[in-house]
């Protein structure tokens, strides 16, 4: 069986005291789009490929810039040393029956990395937002420090069984449950609808930048965003 983490740079991978951002495959792919913005704007370096049977394999051109000599795979790890920021980008989906094993294996790696904290990004159906006067975000955290930003958002509450349920958010709540007993962890979920979710990603980028005090001088749009709705139609059809 392949190694879970395959380091693709010839140096020791140290993420001690880093913040790790993980998107969950959710409605509108807001988490993944937000990570795309981070990768492009902070020029984050790819340092590892993540393998697991739960990850549906895929391969394609570099989605962040026009470097056609580099390919991307379904799940990769990026870092920015100056900001002490790491991000896992998932460009595929996770097989439901293998998802829990994937999350538990990921937790083992995270514990070895000795991270400062983990941020989970997800989205949920806009029609679940029953009070339009509230913030378009909900959050869940095991952090003890107070945050002025969090005080402006709605905290997710457990149901009668003690579980957290957010429709359309993929494995976000399960990942939080798996990590939260040993890892400092915060989850942000944005209400959204399927469609052009690039504005949602811009808004979520602003939110986490404030929360983590990340300095982004210039937000760069990834080249892959040119094809959010697919390639241009072939002229041969006319």
Image: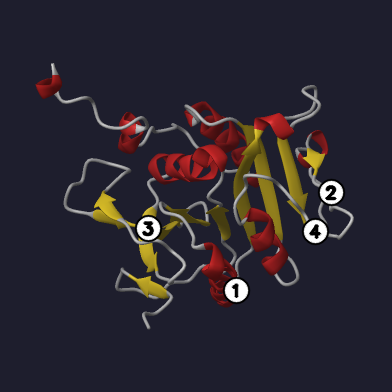
Mark 1 vs mark 2: which is more N-terminal?
1
Residue at which label 4 appears: 163
Name which residue lies at 43% across and 71% down: 52
Residue at which label 1 appears: 104
Mark 3 vs mark 1: which is more N-terminal?
3
Q: Position of residue 95 (x, y in %)?
A: 49, 63
Residue at which label 3 appears: 74
- Marks 1 and 4, how far apart in space? 18 Å
- Nearest the eye: 91 or 22: 91
- Do the residues under discs 4 and 2 have CB atoms within 8 angstroms? no
Mark 3 vs mark 2: which is more N-terminal?
3
Question: Is disc 2 surrounded by few (<14), some (14 to 19) or many (20+) residues within 10 Å?
Answer: few
- Marks 1 and 2, how far apart in space? 23 Å
Q: Position of residue 42 (x, y in %)?
A: 43, 44
Residue 108 vs 162, above or below: the answer is below
Observer able to see residue 113: yes
- Nearest the eye: 42 or 1: 1
Q: Position of residue 164 (x, y in %)?
A: 77, 54
Mark 1 vs mark 4: which is more N-terminal?
1
What is the quadrant of residue 65 in the picture? Answer: top left
Mark 4 vs mark 3: which is more N-terminal?
3
SS assignment at label 4 = loop
């Amino acid at each position: 069986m392949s190694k879970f983490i395959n380091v693709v740079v010839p140096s020791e991978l140290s993420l001690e005291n880093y913040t790790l951002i993980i998107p969950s495959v959710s409605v509108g792919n807001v988490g993944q789009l937000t990570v795309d913005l981070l990768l492009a704007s902070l020029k984050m370096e790819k340092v590892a490929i993540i393998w697991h049977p739960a990850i549906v394999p895929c391969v394609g051109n570099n989605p962040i810039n026009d470097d056609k000599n580099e390919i991307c795979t379904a799940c990769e790890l990026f870092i920015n040393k100056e900001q002490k920021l790491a991000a896992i980008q998932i460009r595929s989906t996770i097989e439901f029956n293998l998802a829990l094993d994937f999350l538990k294996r990921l937790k083992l790696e995270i514990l070895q990395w000795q991270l400062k904290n983990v941020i989970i990004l997800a989205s949920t159906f806009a029609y679940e937002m029953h009070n339009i006067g509230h913030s378009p975000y909900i959050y869940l955290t095991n952090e003890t420090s107070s945050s002025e930003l969090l005080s402006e958002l709605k905290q997710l509450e457990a149901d009668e069984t003690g579980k957290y349920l957010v429709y359309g958010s993929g494995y976000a709540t399960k990942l939080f449950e798996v990590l939260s007993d040993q890892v400092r962890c915060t989850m942000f979920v944005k209400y959204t609808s399927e469609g052009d979710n690039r504005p949602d990603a811009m808004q979520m980028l602003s939110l986490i930048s404030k929360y983590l005090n990340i300095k982004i001088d210039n937000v760069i749009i990834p080249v892959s965003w040119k094809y959010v709705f697919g390639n241009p139609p072939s002229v041969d059809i006319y």
